[in-house]
Image (cartoon, rainbow, N blue to C red):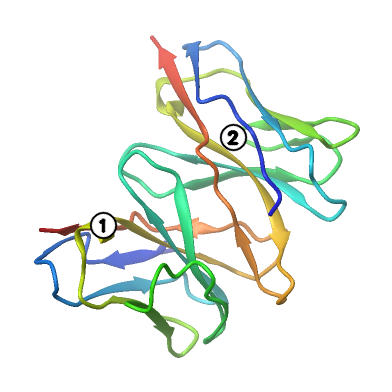
Amino acid sequence: GAGVSQSPSNKVTEKGKDVELRCDPISGHTALYWYRQRLGQGLEFLIYFQGNSAPDKSGLPSDRFSAERTGESVSTLTIQRTQQEDSAVYLCASSLLSSYNSPLHFGNGTRLTVT
Amino acid sequence: DAKTTQPNSMESNEEEPVHLPCNHSTISGTDYIHWYRQLPSQGPEYVIHGLTSNVNNRMASLAIAEDRKSSTLILHRATLRDAAVYYCILREMSQGGSEKLVFGKGTKLTVNP
């Protein structure tokens, strides 16, 4: 079956513009995660969805970042008034359940470059 | 947050076993130990996980110390395709009832032909 799909795969934007990043999780997966990975760094947790609700938004770096999920499926991460420090790969993952025994399946990410 | 400690890098030769260590001295009784790996220009990939007993799957084996303060991911015969960053993660539950995986910097494994 299809894995986690993210679009676009690459996005170049000018400082100050808004961007929307999309994640299509594996069908039937109830949990969805967003991470950020700066060049040469590890993964930084941003937000987690269980169904359409986000019980953990603790990783969002500022109020310029927001995310939503609809229909227990597609999720969108929006970054307003982008800054150069927002340049990174944004990774989405889904899992069947929110459970210790349910592995995360990652997409290949959206590479965001803010010029 | 529970933390793990891994060497920054390791090297291995092709077709030899590789033992990737991870320390997690502050692990709690309900934390599972998960391993993921990330190949260049890809998202992380699940490898294996366990709680107390050693675990085997088609990709690797996981050996967990009796006190659970450390674990070792074992690749029985390294191939060039195993060159990746390997992350050891404790799967924890936050007070709010949600959960997240906290990734450290991982171990960069180089496999020499």
- Give the number of the disc on residue A108: none
- Graded by Cα atoms within 10 Å as few (under 14), some (14 to 19) or many (20 or more), the crowding at tag 1 reads few
Along the horizontal axis of the image, is B99 left or right of A113? right
Q: CA distance from mark 1 to mark 2?
A: 36 Å
Residue holding disc 1: A85
Q: Chain for mark 1?
A: A
Q: Position of residue A28 (x, y in %)?
A: 54, 77
Along the horizontal axis of the image, is A55 left or right of A92? right
Do the dots labelled 1 and 2 sit on one chain? no
Which residue sits at x=74%, y=31%?
A: B71
Q: Secondary structure at mark 2?
A: loop
Residue holding disc 2: B59
Q: Position of residue B80 (x, y in %)?
A: 40, 21
Along the horizontal axis of the image, is A56 left or right of B3? left
Residue that lies at the very extreme toward the bottom in this rendered image: A71
Q: Nearer the viewer, mark 1 or mark 2?
A: 1
Is residue A51 placed above or below A112 in the rendered structure? below
Is residue B14 placed above or below B2 in the rendered structure? above
